[in-house]
Image: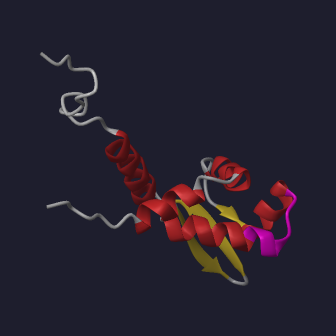
Amino acid sequence: MEVITDFTKDAQIFKALADEKRLLILDYLKNGEKCACVLTDELGIAQSALSYHMKILCLSGIVSSRQEGKWKHYSLSDSGRSFALNRFKELTALGEDSLASCHCHQKSS
């Protein structure tokens, strides 16, 4: 019986990492929490564009947000980063029998 796995969360993580602007945002956030107003200035993007990217990053769990007054503040989520890294390792790990199950290189007698 084949095991079916739900990759919805994985897709959210990798979607978050599949955009240059979002990678730039992560690069800014690695130095600590940033206010949305600072990010819009540093990135040179409109508030609406930042909101779009931050929604994707927050849904992935890699970034967390908190409201302070009228501004949101964003930071990297330790648990989200760990989860994303572990999932990447799990998805790309070679199984012990990955080559053993291949019959194309075996000589026939």
Q: Quadrant of residue 43?
A: bottom right
Residue 52: which quarter of the image? Answer: bottom right
Q: Residue at coordinates 37% horizontally, 51% vertically from top-left?
A: 87
What is the number of callouts on the image? 0
Question: Residue 82 appears at what percent x and percent y?
Answer: 39, 51
Work out whether residue 88 or residue 51 is closer to the camera in this orientation and state it: 88
Q: Is residue 88 above or below residue 1?
A: above
Quarter of the image with the C terminus is top left
Residue 101 or 28: which is nearer the viewer?
Answer: 101
* Side of 18 relative to 90 (left or right): right
- Asked if residue 1 is among those painted magenta in the image, a careful observer would answer no
Which of 7/22 is in front? 7
> Which range of residues does the magenta coloring cover?
44-50
Residue 27 vertical position relative to residue 39 in the rendered view, above or below: above
Would you say residue 49 sits in the magenta stretch?
yes
Residue 90: percent from left, percent from top:
32, 46
Residue plotted at (14% across, 61% down): 1
Q: Report the side of 57 relative to 100 (left or right).
A: right
Considering depth in this image, is 57 or 98 the residue closer to the camera? 98
Residue 93 located left or right of residue 63: left
Q: Residue at x 50, y 59 (%)?
A: 13
Q: How is the model colour-coded?
A: secondary structure
Q: Check the image and name the residue furthest to the front.
A: 109
